[in-house]
Image: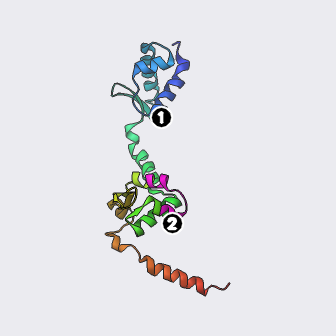
């Protein structure tokens, strides 16, 4: 076929989109007739049937989408589990502040941490570890944050009462610092 050199760009478009892309849109971008796009996709689908390949192209929702093969779903899920379980130290620190001080505003968290926490709060909200639980009765009515049941499940807690006693912990830390020689 004359358009073989466009298979790479076609695959890149499907990968970059993530969502189904209509054949006519692909044809427009690649500046070829729709029939040629459909032929290339058919050839690529055939080549992707080999066992050593992990991807396939499916026709779905009025377009074409690059997907992992269904038989590899268990393997891909393991990656998602690993990624979902990891939090940065900044996220863990912010989560600890929220857990012990809730309900708490973003400004109060930033005051404790000394840095902006917009992105971290967004990540923790996205992972459903924290949520908006109301508004503070103050100027601007800032959002109050608290932990979720997902937070409890993630850390193996039945209730927030199972969190360690922060005041007691801080007292022990102060005592240890006082005993340290200068």
- Distance from disc 1 to disc 2, alpha carbons, whole Å, reads 50 Å
- The correct choice, above or below, for 136 with respect to 21 in the image is below
Q: In percent of the image, x 53 and y 80: which residue is there?
A: 173
Residue 57 location in percent, x, y? 42, 29
Q: Secondary structure at mark 1?
A: loop
| N-term-proximal mark, 1 vs 2 | 1
Q: In percent of the image, x 40 and y 51: which residue is there?
A: 126
Left or right relative to 62: residue 27: right
For mark 2, what is the residue? 112
Residue 142 location in percent, x, y? 39, 57
Q: Colour scheme used in the picture? A: rainbow
Name the mark nearer the viewer: 1 or 2: 2
The part of the chain drawn in magenta is: 109-122
Pick the residue in front: 172 or 79.
Answer: 172
Q: Pointer 2: residues within 10 angstroms few (<14), some, or many (20+)?
A: few
Q: In percent of the image, x 43 and y 55: which residue is there?
A: 124
Q: Secondary structure at mark 2?
A: helix
Tell how many labels: 2
Quadrant containing the C terminus is bottom right
Asked if marks 1 and 2 touch (Cβ < 8 Å), the reply is no
Q: In percent of the image, x 36 and y 67: which residue is there?
A: 156
Residue 113 counted in the magenta span: yes
Q: Quadrant of residue 96?
A: bottom left
Q: Would residue 129 be seen by someone viewing this image from the given angle? A: no
For mark 1, what is the residue? 53
Q: Pointer 1: residues within 10 angstroms few (<14), some, or many (20+)?
A: few
């Amino acid at each position: 076929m004359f358009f073989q050199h466009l298979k790479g760009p076609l695959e890149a478009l499907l990968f970059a989109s993530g969502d189904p892309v209509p054949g006519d849109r692909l044809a427009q971008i690649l500046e070829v007739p729709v029939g040629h796009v459909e032929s290339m996709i058919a050839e690529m689908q055939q080549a992707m049937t080999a066992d050593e390949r992990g991807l396939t192209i499916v026709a779905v929702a009025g377009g074409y989408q690059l997907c992992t093969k269904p038989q590899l779903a268990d393997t891909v899920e393991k990656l998602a589990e690993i990624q979902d379980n990891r939090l940065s130290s900044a996220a863990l620190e912010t989560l600890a502040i929220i857990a012990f001080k809730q309900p708490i505003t973003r400004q109060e968290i930033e005051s404790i941490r000394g840095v902006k926490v917009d992105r971290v709060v967004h990540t923790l909200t996205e992972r459903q570890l924290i949520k908006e639980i109301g508004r503070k009765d103050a100027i601007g009515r800032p959002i109050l944050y608290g932990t979720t049941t997902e937070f409890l499940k993630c850390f193996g807690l039945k209730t927030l009462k199972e969190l360690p006693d922060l005041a007691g912990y801080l007292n022990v830390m102060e005592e240890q610092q006082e005993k340290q020689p200068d």
